Image (cartoon, helix red, strand yellow):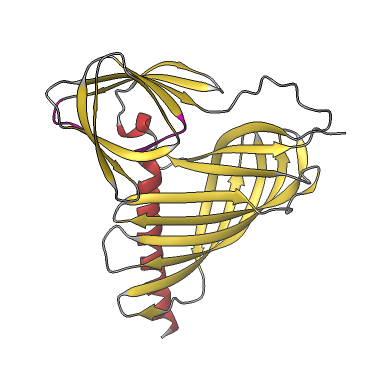
Amino acid sequence: MRSRWSLVATVVLGMVVGALAVALYSQDRATVAPGMKVLLENERVRVQYHDVAVGETVPLHSHPPYVACVLKPYKARLRRSDGSETVVQRKTGDAFWSEAVTHSVENIGDNEIHNLIVEIKTPVSMKEPEKGAAMTMRSSGPFDVKLTPQTAAEKAGEAALGRMSIDKQLHGDLEGTSQGEMLTAGTAVKGSAGYVAIERVSGTLHGRRGTFMLQHSGTVTRGAPQLTITVVPDSGSGELTGLTGRMTITIAPDGKHSYDFEYSLAPAP
């Protein structure tokens, strides 16, 4: 009986992790639209030329806050990750602001869409930070992860639960290891799943040694992803005491994983 449930757990977990991986992979527009022209990119902004042919749909992808300038009039249908949709019409010379969003873009007009988009990666403060005040920083790098099925899943009707251990090797600005546990939920609806996880990270962050905890909460609603990874409040220790922040994960087409971590931490004494 145990081996049977272990098999169920492995299959369900594979489906959940696979769905989440595809969802995460689809989030960056540079990934879903490989021909996207990036005119400028640094740690603060990414300037891109946004073009969508008549009748074309750019799959679900994410933007940080951005400002856009319309170079040609267009009509488009925007579908957000929560399932809502909006039809917009803009004319040449329009400029508009958008908060962070995950959406797809369908060109339903008679003209190609030509926009210039400036994505804001990290807010720039013109005010000199107070002495000893926490500073917002960014770290990134690759990581390797091993997920191992644990105790048998429970199955209720068409839904199934799974549990896995997490073992990571992190590289780049955050160098260290991570161990944790993941709980997953699969459903009878294709493309819908969810997971929560807690992991304990131990290592150095931009040269400062310590530990901290990360909390994951992820869902995929019929293919639309939603993932939040945050530092557990007051979980930092050693030289990482007081750490706060959010992390995003990217899975490349070749399956390689990488992280982007925006965090705040008071300067070292």
In the image: residue 111, left or right of residue 95: left
Q: Can residue 60 be seen here?
A: no
In the image: residue 118, left or right of residue 223: right
Residue 131 at x, y = what percent? 84, 28
Q: Nearer the viewer, residue 75 or 138?
A: 75
In the image: residue 141, left or right of residue 106: right
Residue 36 at x, y = what percent? 32, 23
Residue 79 at x, y = what percent? 28, 42
Q: What is the quadrant of the C terminus in the image?
A: top right
Q: Nearer the viewer, residue 173 or 231?
A: 231
Q: Is residue 61 magenta?
A: yes
Residue 262 at x, y = what percent? 61, 37
Q: Is residue 221 above or below residue 241?
A: below
Q: What is the quadrant of the N terminus in the image?
A: bottom left
Q: Residue at x 40, y 38 (%)?
A: 101
Quarter of the rendering containing residue 161: bottom left
Q: Residue at x 14, y 27 (%)?
A: 109
Q: Is residue 171 above or below residue 4?
A: above
